[in-house]
Amino acid sequence: MLTIGVLISGRGSNLQAIIDAAARGEITGRIAVVISNKADAYGLERARKAGIEAMCIPSKGKSRSEFERELAEALESRGVELVCLAGFMRVLTPYFIRRFKRQIINIHPALLPSFPGENAQGQAFDYGVKVTGCTVHFVDEGVDTGQVILQIPVELREDDTAETLSARILEQEHKAFPRAIQLFAEGRLQVVGRKVRVLPGKKQQNG
Ligand code: GRF
């Protein structure tokens, strides 16, 4: 069973989707720890309610390398094999990325490579695109530049506001993230250069 660590900074609705999917048996993994860099992140509460170890490692008042060393040690000491960034609002340095090579995935609320960075939903809305969505991708040393694992499109409606659009994207995020985690857990993600090949599952192989 895959040992998962989830990093958050805020409300943790994606974390909740992962917790719920695991409880339904849709993720064959165990969330060993949830770590926030903000003490008041509501996601910590969600983790505790689900009986998952929740801890805050503040990023404020220390150097990046100090923060990341603490983070890495907390994850490694719990045997974490997959690090999920679920609304974690810190850019990780190459030191951390290399320490967890191809073991970090992130959810982004746009169809990458369009609209990387913050407020991706607002960026897409203001640009006037007709379709946006969400992306789960491996984390590399750039900002939202890692290989794409899966994407779900969301069409804009004439009466959309940035808020209604964000809400519909979020619904899809809650499907995409657990699905990507399960593909990882099943060992079905094969990275070849920029591409992630999704290998067939057991059921598909048996016809
Ligand atoms: C989500 O929109 C996610 O795509 C982005 O940050 C937001 C986190 O929301 N990276 P939540 O904390 O999971 O509710």
Image (cartoon, grey):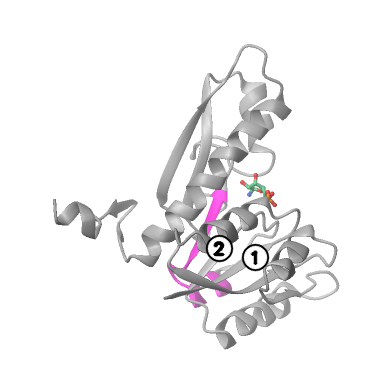
Find the magenta span and give its range: 95-107
> In the rendering, at what x and y percent does residue 89 appear?
70, 56
Which amino acid, mark 1? Leu
**Residue tagged 2:** 84
Tell me where residue 96 appears, x and y as whole percent. Answer: 57, 73
Q: Mark 1 points at which residue?
A: 7
Q: Which residue is drawn at 65% across and 81% down?
A: 69
- The answer to which quarter of the image holds residue 118 is top right
Q: Judge from the rendering whether residue 161 lies leftward or rightward of residue 203; answer left or right.
A: right
Q: Please tell me which residue lies in front, 193 or 45.
A: 45
Q: Does the magenta stretch include residue 61?
A: no
Instruction: Single out the residue that lies furthest toward the bottom.
Output: 77
Measured along the vertical axis of the image, is residue 98 above or below residue 26? below
For label 2, the SS is: strand
Whether the residue carrying mark 2 lies under 8 Å from ligand 1 is answered with no
Pointers 2 and 1 in contact (C-beta within 8 Å): yes
Left-right relation of 39 to 80: right
